[in-house]
Amino acid sequence: MGYPHQPHPRETLVLSKHFGEGDARSLDGWKKRGGYKALETALGMDPVAIQNVVKESGLRGRGGAGFPTGLKWSFMKIGDGKPHYLCCNADESEPGTFKDREIMRWTPHALIEGVAIGAHAIGAENAYIYIRGEFTEPIAVMEAALVEARNAGVVGKNAMGSGKTVNVWVHRGAGAYICGEETALMNSIEGRRGNPRIKPPFPAVAGLFGKPTTINNVETLTAVPHILNHGADWYKKMSRPDNPKSTGTKLWSVCGNIQRPGNYEVEMGFPFGEFLNDVCGGAPQGRTIKAVIPGGCSVPIITREEAERAVMDYEGMMAVGTMLGSAGCIVIDSAQSMPRQIARLARFYAHESCAQCTQCREGTAWTTKILERIVAGDGTAEDLDTLLEIGENMTGKTICVLSDSCATPVSSGLAKFRHEFEALIKTKTVHAVPAVVA
Amino acid sequence: MSHGPSAAGGAVLKAGHGHHDEPHVPVFVGDTRAKLDDLLTRYPSKQAALLPALWMLQQARGWVSEAGMAEIASLLDITPAYVKGVVSFYTMYHQHPVGKYFIQVCTTSPCHVCGAEDVVKAFLDQTGCGELGVTSLDGRYTVIEVECLGACGFATPIMVNEDFLESVTPENVSDVLKKYQ
């Protein structure tokens, strides 16, 4: 669904069906579209029964990790006498990713419904939607929708007359990519610096305010009402018949050097080449796609050839050596210098490191320094091996994966486009002449 | 150019909010105090209201002053040093007064490949700021680069105070600035 919200015939619109329809934002407009029926059903169900439907549907976390949602919910021990919490992760800060923003902007009640169902399914009376501070419009839209939902008794005490309490609150972030990491997000809600916590204990044991907590992405929770309305089988059928592990639809955010950027919703298993070239129109101005970062900028960079033979689901992306991640797809075309783009990516991580772990604090800064030196025309032949070595020391050695996320595009970029780095170091040109990639 | 917030009519804070001159007058009195008290009912700990309280302070003052931080510390039973530690972690709290219009231009990778650097240059040239983070002599503008505004498909997104604008190009920078005089 390219901007401004023109669906492509190859899309399967489930979550994005009402994007661009202004009146879908109101409670009445949402109810007219079948909204809150699933919540009513869910509030009459046993939490474990809801967990089982979601387990059966095969829904996996859409924030990037792809962990099975129903299984995650089942880690919460219902009736343990402790307060439980649900956090909706709306700290959408991964470069390349802008799907949750559109869900909140256009269908706030869809998210509220998903959050309320999720809260009931894990035995939580309080749910917080943590929205990144920069998202002023989604925050305002969500706040307004929550006021409507509270006033109508949809959420709050005795939600929809069920006798259950489901409070839903918005909590505004204040500019920190790391707060999208689940334990950093909980720290941020608690009024702390957004430093990730060491796991274990996992959030399901000791999370927000030290109590059992589940963190789900906006897109994950928004899919839940559809699953309850139409059944687990309906959801499972929207995927490759030979791949039962990636089910349903996925919102893909497409940006960078592409003719028609925007959010597109397709069934899992859609051919990636067809998607990039036909649905999104390929590279602009007659140029060719050179590289693709398919899952938000933390995943390995792949070449056009690899992208074109991939299919769009968790396993399909792994088959070409990358990851589906958050499905924030960054397209880089033949006019771009890869060293320059990779240096810019590293700078992002250096800026966003919470500085808690040495490998990350020092590694992201050092990586950036070397890459920026190479781009400025002062690189040496040894720099490339040094970059790989630093990357190795940044991987798997820190509290969270931000450090790994910086090393990944650098090492994969070097593996795929080393000739561009070497040419730049050799010619010492400040502006690299882009290499031709077959 | 399309305007994000105007579609929902929801931009919370309008331009011209910077009152830099009364840092010692308490902020959390009257309605603002009532709003904070209501906020405290949402969390099992007082400290959890820190980020929202800091937002309230910044919206009232335009920046987060030492006096404001001390006031929040006392209301939430934490120390001013702790508050400062949290404030300095997050990039959106201004620890110093900024221009009447605080302009943030996204230059992270997806916007970078679409030419965001030229948008930054146009803002620096046309606001008279000249340099990132420096307020123009007339006190009107401060321009900074920001890491990912989460609107990558609509390059280049910018924020002017709490207004979110999409698809800004070097060519339409002058039109943007006309609205923020």
Image (cartoon, helix red, strand yellow):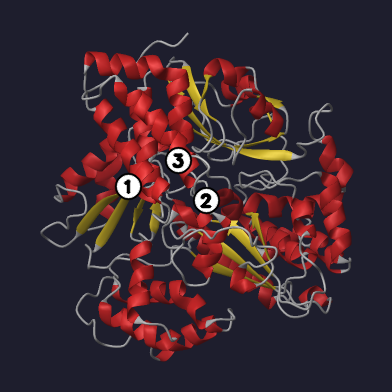
* Residue A176 in the image: above or below residue A82: above
Q: Position of residue A24 (x, y in %)?
A: 66, 56
Q: Position of residue A335 (x, y in %)?
A: 37, 19
How far apart, in angstroms, are the residues tagged by discs 3 and 2? 11 Å
Which residue corresponds to mark 2? Answer: A400
| For residue B103, side relative to residue A66 (left or right) | left
**Which chain letter matches label 2?**
A
Residue furthest to the left in view is B137
Q: Position of residue A245 (x, y in %)?
A: 78, 36
How far apart, in angstroms, are the residues tagged by discs 3 and 1? 29 Å
Give the structural element (helix, strand or loop) at label 1: strand
- Crowding at label 1, few (<14), some or many (≥20) Cα neighbours within 10 Å? many
Q: Amino acid at mark 3?
A: Met
**The N terminus of chain B lies in which quarter of the figure?**
top left
Picture quadrant where residue B82 is located: bottom left
Q: Residue at x 38, y 41 (%)?
A: B108
